[in-house]
Image: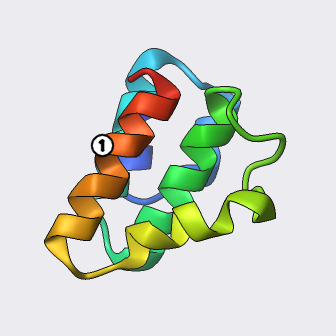
Amino acid sequence: MVRAVERGALELAEQCPTPRVKRALLDRARTADSVTRVNAAALLMYLCGQAPEPFDWNLRPFFLRFGEEDPNELRAAWTELRERTHI
């Protein structure tokens, strides 16, 4: 499951939200392409009980920060994601 998530099959993470799978999502939120980063962050927030659905539109501004190409903004968003999800 971890390898599948690492290769971009984020939707599979919902079937098996183990700590290792959540960590793989966290890594994808930092290292993947911009669209995948946004979706990985959103799904991780959901799996950690910080959002009511896999893409909570109320949190969209936060998620979109993962689509930024500015490394400082991405690093700040990723650090905040770690804090919010306790990972």
x then y, percent, for residue 60:
66, 67
Name which residue type carries label 1: Thr
Which quadrant of the figure has residue 72? Answer: bottom left
**Residue pictured at 60% horizontal, 40% vertical:** 45
- In this rendering, the count of numbered labels is 1
**Residue pictured at 61% horizontal, 25% vertical:** 16
Q: Is residue 17 above or below residue 50?
A: above
Which quadrant of the figure has residue 82? Answer: top left
**Residue pictured at 43% horizontal, 60% vertical:** 8
Side (left or right) of 39 relative to 57: left
Q: Is residue 47 above or below residue 40?
A: above
Pointer 1 residue: 79
| Residue at the extreme bottom of the image, as rendered | 69
Label 1, residues with CA under 10 Å away: few <14, some 14-19, many ≥20: few
**Residue pictured at 41% horizontal, 30% vertical:** 83
Side (left or right) of 57 relative to 71: right
Which of the two residues, 34 or 82, is positioned nearer the viewer here? 82
Which quadrant of the figure has residue 46? Answer: top right
Side (left or right) of 87 relative to 85: left
Visible in this render: residue 37? yes
Label 1's element? helix
Q: Is residue 84 above or below residue 7?
A: above
x then y, percent, for residue 78:
32, 49
Quarter of the picture holding the C terminus: top left
x then y, percent, for residue 85:
50, 29
